[in-house]
Amino acid sequence: RKFYLVLAPPHLPRIWRDADLVSNKYLALVLNWKALVLLGAGFLGGIFTSMSGSGIDICSFSVLTLFFRITEKTATPTSVVLMAINTLIATVYTKYFDDDGFHPLVWEFFSVCAPIVVIGAPLGSMISSFVHRLVLASFIYVTDTAQLVAALYVVRPWTTKECHDRPGGPDCQPLHLCWSSAAIFVSGLLTFYFMTLAGEKLIDRNDNIEEQSTKGEVWSKDGIELRSQENGTLVTTTTTSQGEDDDDDDDVHEEKHQPDTD
């Protein structure tokens, strides 16, 4: 089995500093547009969570994967931890600072969901670390589609089942529910689409910074490739760290090429 030695590429700090809005290194810890984007996603997700019970996990996951292009294997446990912290703070606030407290139905939902979440969240995070990111992404696509279809089946916005036909239910109209649901759905698609486009531009920008920072060093999963000139000859040296099956040695390959005279 082959494994690779991971070193700290010199371009990563520069990519982060490129987003600084001020030159002061202490203020730059806060006044960094990437940090502000993450903060805004958390703030917006917190608002959605207060209204629907879920939001900060969706916002953080979509920003990390679509915009910053973080792998799903990293974004999934990150969103789970953020949701857990947000839930804990909201629970403490509602219990001790809200006069109304919890509705009795909330405790019934909690008793049903708590065992599943306590076991399923860490188990899913552990399993996802052993599978390829495309497998995890495919699983997310399937589960999100199933949740959408199930929500439409349960809510049925084209009927009055959950509206004024139910005793004590809200007074709403099927037409209003249908167009508002469609508007939210389309708005979400457009948001994710434009977030994807912005992420592609950000990747191109980061690639340019990496190219300028490495100065002849090519960082890849196969090792470190160093290019230099020796007596008019281009020398390419590639260093790859091997695993136990390869005698635990680092393979160094050197190639010499005559530069083009054109």
Image: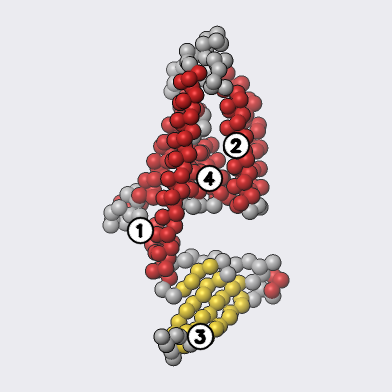
The image shows residue 67, relative to residue 41, as above or below, that is below
Horizontally, is 190 left or right of 71 in the view? Answer: left
Q: Is mark 1 on a helix, strand or loop?
A: loop
Q: Mark 1 points at which residue?
A: 18
Say which residue appears at 66% left-offset and 47% top-offset.
127
Q: Which of marks 4 and 1 is in front?
A: 1
Disc 2 versus disc 4: distance between alpha carbons? Answer: 22 Å
Q: Residue 78 carries which label?
A: 4
Using the rendered view, name the quadrant where residue 20 is placed.
bottom left
Say which residue appears at 46% left-offset and 25% top-offset.
179
Answer with mark 2 or mark 4, whichever residue precedes in sequence. 4
Depth check, front residue: 146 or 18: 146
Where does residue 136 sit, x and y in percent of width and height? 62, 47
Circle 3: is it few (<14), some (14-19), or many (20+) Cα within 10 Å?
few
Disc 1 versus disc 2: distance between alpha carbons? Answer: 37 Å
Answer with mark 1 or mark 3, whichever residue precedes in sequence. 1
Kind of residue at disc 2: Thr
Which residue is the extreme one toward the left? 23
Answer with mark 3 or mark 2, whichever residue precedes in sequence. 2
Quadrant of the drawing holding the N terminus: bottom right
Q: Is mark 3 on a helix, strand or loop?
A: strand
Where does residue 109 sit, x and y in percent of width and height? 60, 24
Kind of residue at disc 4: Thr
Kind of residue at disc 3: His
The image shows residue 250, relative to residue 105, as above or below, that is below
Q: Name the residue under label 3.
A: 257
Q: Mark 2 points at which residue?
A: 145
Horizontally, is 181 left or right of 34 in the view? Answer: right
